[in-house]
Amino acid sequence: MLAPGALQVAAGHGRGAAGRTYDWDRIDRARDQSFALLAETLTGHPVNAEDPAAAKALHREAVDLWSAEPGRTAADAARAFRTAAARAEHALF
């Protein structure tokens, strides 16, 4: 699944340097926020749940389902990431 794997790599999972410390709590929070924004971008509506763990699962499921659709391409994923990034940038500034 292209999109979830890309977010994991961007978060640094599996790429940490030996002997270096990382603030994994902070990195994981940013990754989770990225999944939430991407899920909302892909579905066109907020993907929420009362329980944070349930919300996280719903975000991942929405991204996984979108990514697994037949015919989905890397270009589609790149376009989705750019759209989500533009939304995040707009929300921050």
Image (cartoon, helix red, strand yellow):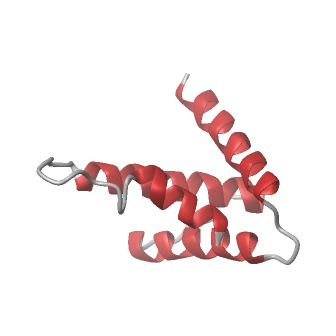
Q: Residue at x 35, y 62 (%)?
A: 14
Q: Where is residue 56 drawn, in percent x and y?
A: 47, 69
| Looking at the image, residue 91 lies above or below residue 74 | above
Farthest top residue in view: 93
Q: Residue at x 70, y 40 (%)?
A: 82
Q: Observer-nearest residue: 66 or 73?
A: 73
Farthest right residue in view: 71
Q: Observer-nearest residue: 58 or 4?
A: 4
Q: Where is residue 25 drawn, in percent x and y?
A: 25, 55
Figure disc tally:
0
Relative horizontal placement of residue 17, taking residue 20 as reference (left or right):
right
Q: Residue at x 56, y 71 (%)?
A: 60
Relative horizontal placement of residue 37, taking residue 28 as reference (left or right):
right
Q: Where is residue 87 drawn, in percent x and y?
A: 66, 37
Q: Quadrant of the N terminus?
A: bottom right
Q: Where is residue 37 drawn, in percent x and y?
A: 59, 51
Relative horizontal placement of residue 82, taking residue 33 as reference (left or right):
right
Quadrant of residue 18 within the rendered picture: bottom left
Q: Residue at x 57, y 68 (%)?
A: 59
Farthest left residue in view: 19
Quadrant of residue 3 within the rendered picture: bottom right
Q: Quadrant of the C terminus?
A: top right
